Image (cartoon, rainbow, N blue to C red):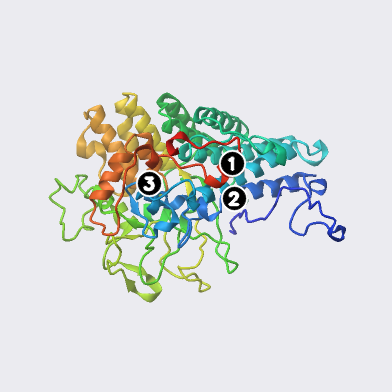
Amino acid sequence: MKKLIYLISILFLASCSEDYLERGSLTQLAEGNFWQNEKDALLGINGVYEVLQDRVMYSGNLNGVAGIPQHDSFADNTFNNYKFEGPGNFVEGRADPAYGFFLSFWTSLYRGIARANVAIENIARIPDSNISASSRDALVAQAKFLRALFYFNLAVYFEDAPLITSTQTLEEAYVPKNSYEELRAFVISELRAAADALPVSYPPSQFGYATKGAALSLLARFELYNQNYGEVIRLTSEIMSLGYQLHPSYEQLFTEAGEQSKEIIFSVRFIQDQSNNGETFSSTFLGIPKVNVQPMPNLVNSYLCIDGLPISSSPLYNPQKRKENRDPRLGASIYFEGDIFVKYLDRPFRGNTATKFGLKKYVRDDQSADGIAPFSPGGQDFYVIRYADVLLMRAEALAESGQLSEVYPLLDQIRTRAGMPTVTDVNGTSLSQSELLNLVRLERRVELAFEGLRFMDVKRLGEVEAAYARAKADPVGPYNPQYRGRLSEVFAIPQSEIDANPNLVQNPVWN
């Protein structure tokens, strides 16, 4: 089935004010002849989704500004060898407010917010005769979900930022920033409103639009980030009643064959074609695995052996054959020397990365049926939220709340799907709270590796400094992480924004 795709170039602006032969803009949709009916509303919503496909958002990159799929490099999971992309220079302490990555990310987030604001305002004005009430409510709820997702990223990465909830004239554009707490309250309110109005599912042809489960899951992630464990428990209970389930194959899940699995709660959709519209996080070079995102040795060492024990105590571990007798998710996620990483060329990985490991999860290893090579843009969807994450969020919240007995079956589900022995079988059911929390956090790290969540996880746990120390201790030659306190935990408001807006002041961390 042809996948739903959001690729549409809509600029929500009035046409040009110049008379230039009194000709209407050929690239813009004028407000006077748009937003007239349900079809227009759907096109407008697609324009908001399209921002998610930006390279700096969820499309990622093979050689350019880093996207969210590469954000594990802001912590200890991966090494960003092409440091100019963003994470490498940030971790090594060479970023300042003029750093281009900050501006690219900020601009994309606010472009999405602006489109969502226009859609929300204009869909509400479409005559009742041209759109059903149920469609209007669902489309506005999608726009609110997307606006909340953009502000979620602003809150996590920038903390303080302008909260803009309506369209602006040029004179209204010089706004001050809002506090993290104001952004937090807004995101929570928006996601609650969206969850109340969004459907549980859509017809298969509309797979990819935001659902009730997507809004509840993003809200649960944000509440976990803010350590509101009681709310995480309540939200995940509701999500678990919506019909999601774990995909039977972990390895297959991160290929196009797994894109419409019942595990996927919300994804950013892509399609591979000759028009170069696909994503690049699944692309790789032909002579070496995706060299700009290299798995770190400390992450490799964190995967348990197949007996459920760490490499430090398992009799099955052989340091000369590090891939053998290990958690199957390790081999599904990481290339080791000798692994074939380009199938149609029968090309083995020579261990020629700085970390000696290659990224496998999500990455294509073959050309498509019509000959598109793995270094070209691909059609792999990026999973923003999946059901395994919900189970792990719930497990952590329960463990933090002292409700330990309910944690074991959640971890056991994840372990069983992975082909690992359960926590119950290996560790019993009498672990202390701290021991169980350590297992939950380990499980979260290996299950969700390379999905762009590691930085926000170590940040919410107050472990960014420890993550930098682990990365610094790894034998990676051209890498020297420099923990700089809060400068390593908060992105700077772009200097060009400060210069252009007299009412906008820098986050004090960066002063």
Q: Give percent across and percent down for residue 330.
A: 29, 54
The amino acid sitting under disc 3 is Leu
Choose between 203 and 174: the one closer to the eye.
174
Q: Do the residues bearing badges 2 and 3 touch, measured as CB atoms within 8 Å?
A: no
Q: Give percent across and percent down for residue 184.
A: 51, 30
Tag in front: 1 or 3: 1
Q: Residue furthest bottom?
A: 345
Q: Where is residue 175, by image quadrant?
A: top right
Q: Do the residues bearing badges 1 and 2 touch, measured as CB atoms within 8 Å?
A: yes
The amino acid sitting under disc 2 is Val
Q: Quadrant of the C terminus?
A: top left
The amino acid sitting under disc 1 is Leu
Taking the spot 29% from the left edge, 60% from the top edge, the residue there is 357
Disc 2 to disc 3, C-alpha distance: 24 Å
Taking the spot 36% from the left edge, 48% from the top edge, the residue there is 93
Q: Is 186 positioned to the left or the right of 264 in the image? A: right
Q: Quadrant of the N terminus?
A: bottom right
Q: Secondary structure at mark 1?
A: helix
Q: Secondary structure at mark 2?
A: helix
Crowd class of label 1 (few under 14; some 14 to 19; many from 20; radius 10 Å): many
Q: Confirm whether residue 420 shows in the render.
A: no
Number of residue marks: 3
Name the residue carrying label 2.
Answer: 51
Choose between 1 and 280: the one closer to the eye.
280
Name the residue carrying label 3.
Answer: 448
Name the residue carrying label 1.
Answer: 146
Taking the spot 54% from the left edge, 36% from the top edge, the residue there is 505
Q: Confirm whether residue 354 shows in the render.
A: yes
Taking the spot 76% from the left edge, 52% from the top edge, the residue there is 29
